Image (cartoon, rainbow, N blue to C red):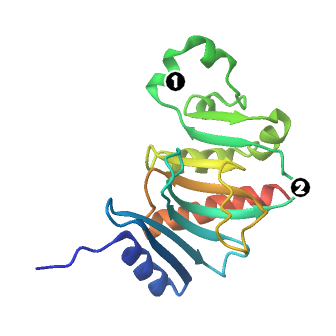
Amino acid sequence: MEKDISSVDILKAIAKKADWEINIKEETRNSRHGITVRKVIIRNYQIKNSYFISVQSANFDKYSLYSGIFFPVSGYDNYKLLIRKRHSLDKLSFRKNRLRFKIGNSSFDSKVLIETNNDIETHKLLSSSKIQLEIIEFLNTDDCLYVGFNEINPTFNTELKGKKFLSVFMASNWILDKELIDKAHNLGYRIRNKLN
């Protein structure tokens, strides 16, 4: 009988093949109910100051399970941004639809939903049509993919404590595909470079 391959095993294999550094922390919080907390950090040193983080926590919030690329950023402590694929339900709320933030490019605006607290900074960040196209292509890969700024700020590792992050991530699941990890790395890297 073949042993089930866990998500952690898949990430270990990806990290080994790509020659990335991997740190894994697993602990059982409630053995009776089978609640296990998993935290995986992978470092790809070819992309400076980036972390591939996957978390399964015991919390019951919207990000109790997530995975993605995180870039620490400074000087943007209060900036909030969340970009996700626009769904058919989003189009049904006419008032919300009319008031939502838009870049001004209808082919981009019709495909994404943007939540932000700084319109000017968001316009600057997303002004490139190349980045807009890359974001659409990335989000179209899966309905649970997001691009965020200060949306998730991991703190479980001393290296990550107190930092704010640009993140390209998947909620409710882990990214277990090397090609998608690379896409997230590349997109995050390009967006981060727009900040300088």
Label whose residue precedes the other's in the sequence (2 or 1): 2
Quarter holding the N terminus is bottom left
Choose between 7 and 98: the one closer to the eye.
Answer: 7
Quarter holding the C terminus is bottom right
- Name the residue that disc number 1 marks: 90
In the rendered image, residue 162, in percent from the top left (x then y), is placed at 79, 63
Residue at 85% of width from left, 36% of height from top?
Answer: 120
The image quadrant of residue 107 is top right
The image quadrant of residue 121 is top right
Residue type highlighted by circle 2: Gly
Q: Where is 47 relative to 64, above or below?
A: below
In the rendered image, residue 62, in percent from the top left (x then y), is placed at 52, 44
In the rendered image, residue 167, in percent from the top left (x then y), is placed at 65, 56
Residue at 55% of width from left, 44% of height from top?
Answer: 136
Number of labelled discs? 2
Q: Are marks 2 and 1 in contact (CB under 8 Å)?
A: no
In the rendered image, residue 91, in percent from the top left (x then y), is placed at 51, 20
Residue type highlighted by circle 1: Asp
Choose between 144 and 134: the one closer to the eye.
Answer: 144
Question: At numbered mark 1, what does the secondary structure look like: helix, strand or loop?
Answer: helix
- Name the residue that disc number 2 marks: 75
Q: Residues within 10 Å of mark 1 (few under 14, many from 20)?
A: few
Callout in the foreground (2, 1): 2
